[in-house]
Amino acid sequence: MIASHSVLRRPLLAAVIGASCAVPVLAHADINPEFFGYARSGIGSTSGGGSQTCFKAAGAPAKYRLGNECETYAEIGLGAQLYQQQDATFDFASRVAYVTAQDNDDESLKDDDNNVALREMYVSGNNVVGGLPGATLWAGKRFYKRHDIHMNDYYYWDLSGPGVGISDIDVGTGKLSFAWVRSSGSDVDYLPDEDQRLSDDTIDVRWTDIPVNPGGSLQLGVDYGRASLPDWQKDYYDDRGVDYDEGDKGWMGTIEHTQSGWFGGTNTVALQYATDGIITSDGNAVGRASGSLQQEGDMWRILDQGHVWLVQDKLDMLYTAIYENKDMDDNTGRKWFSAGVRPVYYWNDIMSTAVELGYDHIEPQSNVSSYNDSDHHLTKLTIAQQWSAGRGAMIRPTIRLFATYAKWNGDAYLDRDAEGYRQANSLDTGAGPNNVDFDDTDGLTFGAQMEVWWGS
């Protein structure tokens, strides 16, 4: 009897073990990893000697990028859809970025000019909230609904970072999205330990895809951010007479219109207004709290950008114009006007010639001391011969040979500071190697670059 029970149990046990082993095998077989990312790298020199100088007007938030990028930069992403049941899905995405000074074969990430960063790590669930078909619930660290101008790599609306939200809720006319994101920064002027960081929370509300005219849609957004101070930080600031009542918070409103079918392409116009602590410390207001407690003032910005076909399949053009007025109570703001065009002529499906002309004008307020305190401007012209995977200004991968000429008013740099570093005057010292002379008013560079993006 015992023997017969053992005989009966053995096939059952084998079946259970076999099934348990098969489950993870089948699950893994259903997962198809996605590989996505972006990269650029190349080589360049400055006329007169030295590696490639990158030309950016001191005080400007951005520079025109064609033939004017001096680093190797990459973002490598991995993700996958991990679950699907009828219309409900769960997806995972991750992205690591790295930048090097583009100097050597082996460049240590411990150097000041080299860095590696975790940019994204999040899960999104689509159609997982009952009663909200089509909506996406997400949590983690991510690029969130970023708005940028490609020509100068300028992100004018960007809440990327750790957060949680629900997006694309269908409300009949357009879609609603809500997000809570977090950023932090060190207050080196007051906090005694750099690890005692200021924590900033921002609430983002957007109403998108609002039809307003044939081929045209409207997007409205409001961002409110403020510092989240624990009691010990409040006491610390109170004891030192630091007034954080206004500068620790702020808001930004955005109205944006996008027109499709615009001369074979698209056109986008955006108007933004921001106050106090949401005006970030680098001079931009991107919709994210800044980590500043005493930053008071306001900013407004209007911009227009687009891509059009001037001659179908033969000549297209990217273009942009930006005006921004940052008026700070301590007179550390500035006015910024920028305009640029990039026409591209296509010789065939692979080869093209691109020309980029960009102009930046800076009018600093009276208390700005880090660069030329009078109006200054920079004009940059690049011609590039390109080999790309098709026709179109946004087609990649691309290999290009380029020559860039820039001219500015005033000396390029001021004398060295106490540590021996050049000080910005008309040129930004952080845009790349500084291989033009202190008193130069123009410069010429040449080189080659590849640029590629793929996947999501």
Image (cartoon, rainbow, N blue to C red):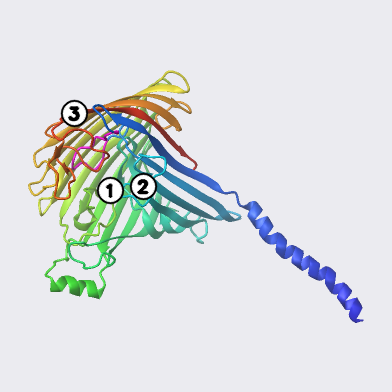
Pick the front one: 75 or 205: 75
Give the number of the mark in front: 1 or 2: 2
Identify which amino acid the numbered label 1 is placed on.
Thr
Q: Mark 3 highlights which residue?
A: 442
The numbered dot on residue 254 is: 1
Q: Residue at x 25, y 53 (%)?
A: 252
Q: Residue at x 32, y 36 (%)?
A: 69
Q: CA distance from mark 3 to mark 1?
A: 37 Å
Q: CA distance from mark 1 to mark 2?
A: 13 Å
Helix, strand or loop at disc 1?
Answer: strand
Question: Which residues fall within the magenta stretch?
Answer: 51-63
Identify which amino acid the numbered label 2 is placed on.
Arg
Left or right: 124, with 116 as reference point: right
Q: Mark 2 highlights which residue?
A: 146
Mark 3 and mark 2 lie on one chain; the one further toward the N terminus is 2
Mark 3 and mark 1 lie on one chain; the one further toward the N terminus is 1
Identify which amino acid the numbered label 3 is placed on.
Asp
Q: CA distance from mark 3 to mark 2?
A: 34 Å
Q: Position of residue 327 (x, y in %)?
A: 13, 49
